[in-house]
Amino acid sequence: MTSLDTGLSRADAQNAAREVRKRKVQAFLFVVPLLVFVVLAFVAPIATMLYRSVHNPTVANLVPETLAALSDWSGETLPDDAVLTQFAVDLKRMANDRTSGQIADEINRALPGMSSVVKATARSLRRVDDADLATNGAALLLAANDRWAEPDTWRALKAAGRVYTADYYLTSVDLEHTAGGGIVQRDTQIYKKLYVKTLRMALIITLLTILLGYPLAFYMAHASDGLANFLMVFVLLPFWTSLLVRTTAWIALLQTNGVVNSTLMATGITDAPIEMLYTEFSTIIAMTHILLPFMVLPLYAVMRGIDSSFMRAAISMGSRPLGAWYKIYLPMSLPGLSAGALLVFIISVGYYITPALVGGTDGQMISNIIAFHMRESNNWELAAALGSLLLLLILLLYWLFDRFVGTDNIKLG
Amino acid sequence: MKDLGSDVFLRFDNVKKTYDQKNLVVKGFDMDVQDGEFITLLGPSGSGKTTVLMMLAGFESVTSGDIAIAGKSITRTAPNKRNIGMVFQNYALFPHMTVAENLAYPLTVRKLPKPQIKARVAEYLDLVELSSFGNRRPGQLSGGQRQRVALARAMIFEPTLILMDEPLGALDKNLREQMQFEITRLHKKLGFTVIYVTHDQTEALSMSDRIAVFNDGVVQQCAPPSELYERPVNAFVADFIGENNFVPGRVTSLQGSTAQVQTEGGPLVAQAAEGLVQGQACRVSIRPEKLFIPPTSHAHDNALTVRFNTRIYVGDFIRYYFKMPDGTDIIVKVLNDLSAPEFADNAEAQLLWLASDCIAFPAS
């Protein structure tokens, strides 16, 4: 049929198209504020973090000339005197600018132990006359410390001078570059173990919330409205109290002379107090408590929508109640279960405050190490790399979940 | 009728149920059902009919009394051991299984061999004319198709009894009629016993062998549809089943089963309901389609003078609304043919009917 047959003129079509365009613009205007907010508060910070994990211009900005001179250096022997002299000049300038501490930190990260060497050399070079330095810089540098005579030192400087680097990612998975450019395991294995531990703890917490939350949600979904609402208050109560207060309450309960230990000792179950606080155990138990509502709410919402007739139908057909639950009710409540499990797991993988407060050294998770690098060691690039890796891990898990369970099986209500 | 002797298949013996330990929802329910009967429990919501069904299925406990199938008490039997098929109003088809898997479910839990399950599923899909739908999910079926799957699933394990809890409640009018026909067809063909719960009397009247009318936890009358309609035992049944006019009056004399009643519109002769005594205030029930407006060739024993109020055109029928001198509304249904008369506003009219078509009930 042509447009003539339908009685639709060109002007009509244009009018209709204009109407559609207008609606699209309107719809877009509705979401503009949120879009701007999301870009500023979510996309931009994550992009910055990803960028920072591979981008480190500090050294390149401090000693551009030295790095330019080093670019032709083979790396096998000591660099030319010209390079050494240039670095000596740069070091004096930095000593006077009070930026020598920064370069000391950066080189130290590539080659541990270099911090004091750089700082001491900078101090000694500060007193040297400019003209003297320009001619005898190399000799003065070598005289200041033996380590300047080692090619390793210069390789470290060259490595630290790269603006774009994957080193932080290598560090995040406990690997490092060797002198020859290969990749080997680091002597101290920290982060891989921590990732595994974080995932294991998140998994235990998720399983515990399922174990505690599923029966409760089931009971609530089948209780009368009044009772269900009453119980719902108790599920939501944790949401209405401060996270800090709840975590602190766990400290009061679990500490050596706390309520739990006193009770155990009073009832004669133990003779001496059990160390429960500042362990993995206390982190898991406190986080299970805090994250339980995230499991119960989606489960309850989904179960509420499952009519009791499904179970009754299955039972009337001869199925035992447990069999009917497994074959009929469980698959039907799976959307809520997946939503709750995914929510609890992802939140607990990135959880910070509870492990920080009750975890001690034993119960620390990956986010605590990220915070440590942000606040204590000032290694933002490594923190960014660890954070990016965590993000990647979660995306990977989400992808796996989508593969095997299906995201269309997630339902929050 | 109570004396069915050894033919009794399902027996309710003084079954009572209370939820709150104070009020009885079902007050002493007795009924004998023969093998292959189609019994409908009919009543307004909250009358206890669904509770009876749930007690029979085993999802509600029996407070006192006994339910027996084929002479064996099932009151203490677990619901999954009762071998009773059930059809629910919302179909209760398992959404995560295909139609074929839904049908196979009761056979799978009975651990039948796979080839046998497959054959039986095919047979029952064919029975409900859904052979090509085995691989669909319930969500991809129309309401009528889902209902047929639910029916097939309730029948496939050859239960001793099939319960239907308002199975057609969610369907529109046309589909409902089709499905009524379908259920009746299957019932005739396979000869299973059905306990059917509904609040839709048309459904009940057109499908059942017998109907038990529930009100307030008590069976008011249990009888075949025509008897229920023509010979209701009390005013509730007369009012609940079909449409009825009630003319208030007083019993002047009582001779056997015939009563003379004095009303505002004149004296009437009516069938006397049980418990009617002379001098008592009463209500004479008369169906709208049994009333005739003269001129008519129909025989009549009673005549009532009324005033025309209004008439409503409903297509195949015309409904006339008259008022008696005391204000009681009288409805008359007249076939929409050439004999349907015209009236001026407030015009006086005569209504004629047979004494055997009206029953005098004691006024409550």
Image (spheres, coloured by chain):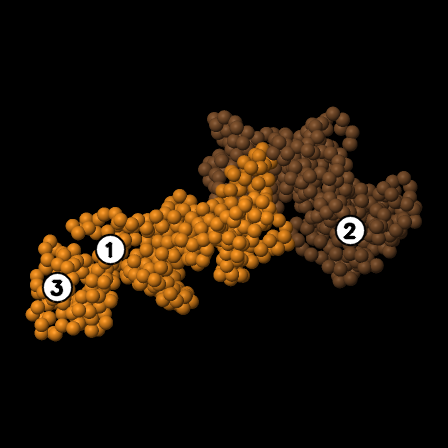
Residue closest to the eye, B198 or A344: A344
Identify the chain of the residue marked 3, using the numbered disc in the image. Answer: A
Amino acid type at image mark 2: Asn
Q: Which of the labelled discs sits on residue B245, or is there none?
A: 2
Q: Secondary structure at mark 1?
A: helix
Mark 2, Cα crowd under 10 Å, few <14 / some 14-19 / many 20+, is many
Residue type indicated by callout 3: Ala
Chain for numbered disc 1: A
- What colour is chain B? brown
Q: The chain shown in orange is which?
A: A
- Label 2 vs label 1: CA separation? 94 Å
The chain letter under disc 2 is B
In the foreground, B285 or B158: B158
- At x 92%, y 46%, the residue is B278
Rendering coords of residue A254 (x, y %): 51, 53
Task: Locate residue B47 relative to residue A243 in the image: left or right.
Answer: right
